[in-house]
Image (cartoon, rainbow, N blue to C red):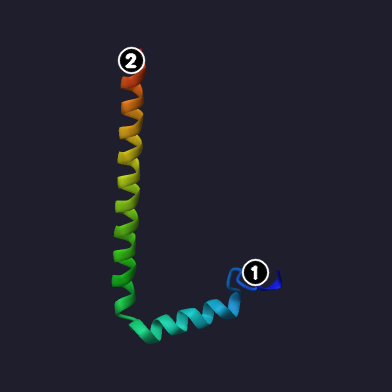
Amino acid sequence: MKSLFALGMPGGWEWVIIILVVLIFFGAKKIPELARGLGRGIREFKDATKEIKKDIDDSAKLEDEKK
């Protein structure tokens, strides 16, 4: 049971180590490009989620109108 708690959120020093490893692997010039790509991906996901929700709401309204 203790091993489950060992996999919690990283603390202060762990974040520092993670950031240093990312800087070493990708370099300082590549990080903004990666962040932009991540932002675009999140935006597309949100837009797709909104579109699906709208389609479901529209079909529910049509179903209610038929009754």
- Residue that appears at 36% across and 29% down: 57
Crowdedness near tag 1: few (<14), some (14–19) or many (≥20) residues, C-alpha within 10 Å: few
Q: Quadrant of the C terminus?
A: top left
Going by the image, does 47 lie left or right of 15? left
What amino acid does circle 2 point to?
Answer: Glu
- Residue that appears at 30% across and 80% down: 29
Classify residue 5 by image quadrant.
Answer: bottom right
User: Can you give x and y, in whole percent of width and height, for residue 12 in the image?
Assistant: 59, 76
Q: Secondary structure at mark 2?
A: helix
Looking at this view, name the residue that lies furthest to the bottom. Answer: 24
User: Can you give x and y, in whole percent of width and height, for residue 49 in the image?
Assistant: 35, 44
User: Can you give x and y, in whole percent of width and height, for residue 10 in the image?
Assistant: 58, 73
26 or 66, nearer to the observer: 66
Reading the image, the residue beneath label 2 is 65
What amino acid does circle 1 point to?
Answer: Leu
**56 in relation to 33, above or below:** above
Looking at this view, name the residue that lies furthest to the top. Answer: 67
Q: Secondary structure at mark 1?
A: helix
- Residue that appears at 32% across and 40% down: 52
User: Can you give x and y, in whole percent of width and height, for residue 27 in the image?
Assistant: 34, 84
Q: Earlier in the sequence, mark 2 or mark 1?
A: 1
30 or 7, nearer to the observer: 7
Reading the image, the residue beneath label 1 is 4
